[in-house]
């Protein structure tokens, strides 16, 4: 989240000394408010800036190119580097998940998503090319944690019934998909802001695959739930 401090000096005699408006994601806040109406304007900082104790309140903009006065271009590159590392981790994790899956439907889904993931890595490389930047990954700690959790779930799954083990695996996989959906949504929105339509198109394609993968995992989970409940249903029928 970012906040921008805008200092406006109102017409003389109209408002007082000056007016501080905090412009955040959700619009503007008049920090004077009714509690001190009639007095001078109270200068305050947005919570986001207050949180950074000791940090300078001035916003430093570093423009790497003429079109990146806002820093959004740099942010997009950063997001892409993070996604690249996340996807590369998944090209290693997905074969293990496919191997651990007990039901064919789930194993095939992981195998199919591995192919998509390899294409997604290629698309990120293309994005860097389009943006004229070196292809470089940045450690994605979020995905490292999710992959580690997935490994734990696979180890624990060895002791579980087939349907329960696969349902746990789906839980781990859906966490991954949702994480990727967030990352691609952020990157796509940034690319849209920067009017990089070719990059937007590439990111949209990967985003659609992640959303589709999440939906397919949901469908497999639903059918596995009925498999898991089957013994009870049979007992009831007897
Ligand atoms: Fe992916
Ligand atoms: Fe994915």
Image (cartoon, grey):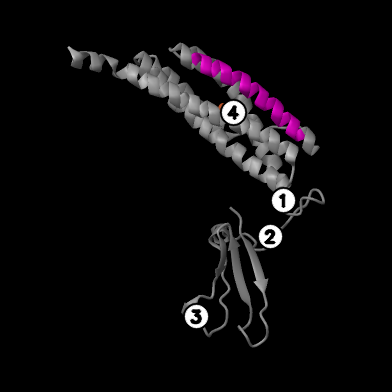
Secondary structure of the residue carrying tag 2 is loop
CA separation in Å, label 3 and label 4: 53 Å
Packing grade of label 2 (10 A; few <14, some 14-19, many >=20) is few
Q: Tell us which disc is closer to us: 2 or 3.
A: 3
Q: Residue at x 82, y 51 (%)?
A: 66
Per the rendering, the mark at residue 36 is 3
Q: Is residue 124 visible?
A: yes
Observer-nearest of 141 and 230: 230
Q: Quadrant of ligand 2?
A: top right
- Of callouts 4 and 1, which one flags the residue occurring earlier in the amino acid sequence? 1
Q: Tell us which disc is closer to us: 4 or 1.
A: 4
Magenta part of the protein: which range? Answer: 107-128
- Image height check: is 11 above or below 140? below
The residue labelled by disc 2 is 59
Q: Residue at x 44, y 19 (%)?
A: 154
Q: Quadrant of residue 39?
A: bottom right
The residue labelled by disc 1 is 71
């Amino acid at each position: 989240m970012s906040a921008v401090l805008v200092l406006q000096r109102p017409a003389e005699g109209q408002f007082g000394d000056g007016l501080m408006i905090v412009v955040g994601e959700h619009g503007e806040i008049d920090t004077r408010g009714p509690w001190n109406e009639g007095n001078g304007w109270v200068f305050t900082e947005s919570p986001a800036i207050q949180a950074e104790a000791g940090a300078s309140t001035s916003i430093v903009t570093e423009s790497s190119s003429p079109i990146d006065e806002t820093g959004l271009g740099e942010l997009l590159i950063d997001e892409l580097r993070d996604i690249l590392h996340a996807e590369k981790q998944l090209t290693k994790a997905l074969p293990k998940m496919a191997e651990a899956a007990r039901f064919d439907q789930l194993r095939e889904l992981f195998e199919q998503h591995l192919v998509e993931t390899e294409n997604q890595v290629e698309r990120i490389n293309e994005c860097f090319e389009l943006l004229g930047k070196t292809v470089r990954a940045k450690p994605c700690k979020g995905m490292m944690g999710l992959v580690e959790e997935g490994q734990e779930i696979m180890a624990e799954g060895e002791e579980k019934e087939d349907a329960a083990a696969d349902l746990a695996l789906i839980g781990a996989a859906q966490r991954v998909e949702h994480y990727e959906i967030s990352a691609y949504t952020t990157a796509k929105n940034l690319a849209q802001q920067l009017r990089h339509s070719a990059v937007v198109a590439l990111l949209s394609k990967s985003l659609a695959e992640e959303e589709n993968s999440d939906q397919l995992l949901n469908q497999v989970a639903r059918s596995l739930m009925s498999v898991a409940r089957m013994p009870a249903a049979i007992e009831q029928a007897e």
